Image (spheres, rainbow, N blue to C red):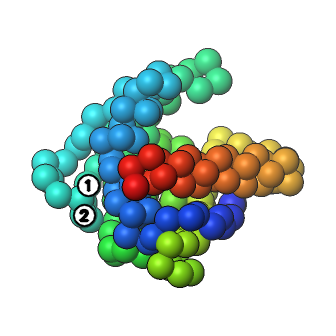
Amino acid sequence: MKFSTKEDIEAPIEAVFDMLGDFEFFERAAMRRGAEVQRTDTKNVPGVGMGWRASFPLRGKRRQVDIELVTYDRPTEMVFECRSPNLIAMLTVELVALSRSRTRIMVSTDIKPLNLSARLLVQSLKLAKTSLTKKYKLRIAEFAKSLEDRHKRVA
């Protein structure tokens, strides 16, 4: 099951990529929302092979996911593989420079079940695909706006 959307950001492509590559910022944000996040690699600079183990409450249960950065192509693309015992998801973030000060961000998430219970979950998600797609697009639009605002504060 795949979700995708695109948004335009009033910021240069390098600045947007740098904000997306500020992994410590995202780790802190996840912790503020109740997740436990641990780095699973020892890299000092961003790149392929970076990894995290995250644990968070969802629907009354504690869930765990392992995240690995599998593509890091500065300044145009990052791909994350997110694995749980039941699902695997690929999160792709692509950037395209529209002008010196404008960047298009394209985000897609592809979810694949690994067992029967996950298949049932994905099947039920397909029934609600229209509303889930709307929510996905709204969240990415909010995220893009936050990146734009962050850039304006720094610039």
* Above-or-below relation of 50 to 13: above
Q: Nearer the viewer, residue 137 or 120?
A: 137
Could you tell me how many numbered marks the image carries? 2
10 Å crowding of disc 1: few (<14), some (14-19), many (20+): many
- Give the amino acid type for the residue marked by disc 1 in the picture: Met
Residue 139 is labelled as: none
Q: Secondary structure at mark 2?
A: loop
What residue sits 44% from the left and 62% below the top?
16
Q: Nearer the viewer, residue 138 or 60?
A: 138
Residue 134 spot, x, y in % from top left: 80, 51
Residue 86 left/right relative to 123: left
Q: Is residue 12 visible?
A: yes
Q: Nearer the viewer, residue 125 or 106?
A: 106
- The C terminus appears in which quarter of the rendering? bottom left
- Give the amino acid type for the residue marked by disc 2 in the picture: Gly
Q: Is residue 79 visible?
A: no
Splitting the image into 4 quarters, where does residue 112 fall? bottom right
What residue sits 24% from the left and 59% below the top?
46
Residue 151 spot, x, y in % from top left: 45, 54
User: To which residue does mark 1 refer?
Assistant: 50
- Does the residue at mark 2 contact the one at mark 1 (Cβ under 8 Å)? yes
Residue 27 spot, x, y in % from top left: 36, 37
Residue 43 spot, x, y in % from top left: 15, 53
What residue sits 72% from the left and 54% below the top?
137
Q: Nearer the viewer, residue 15 or 28?
A: 15
* Above-or-below relation of 49 to 62: below
- Kindly report the distance in space between the C-alpha atoms of the residues bearing marks 2 and 1: 6 Å
Residue 47 is labelled as: 2
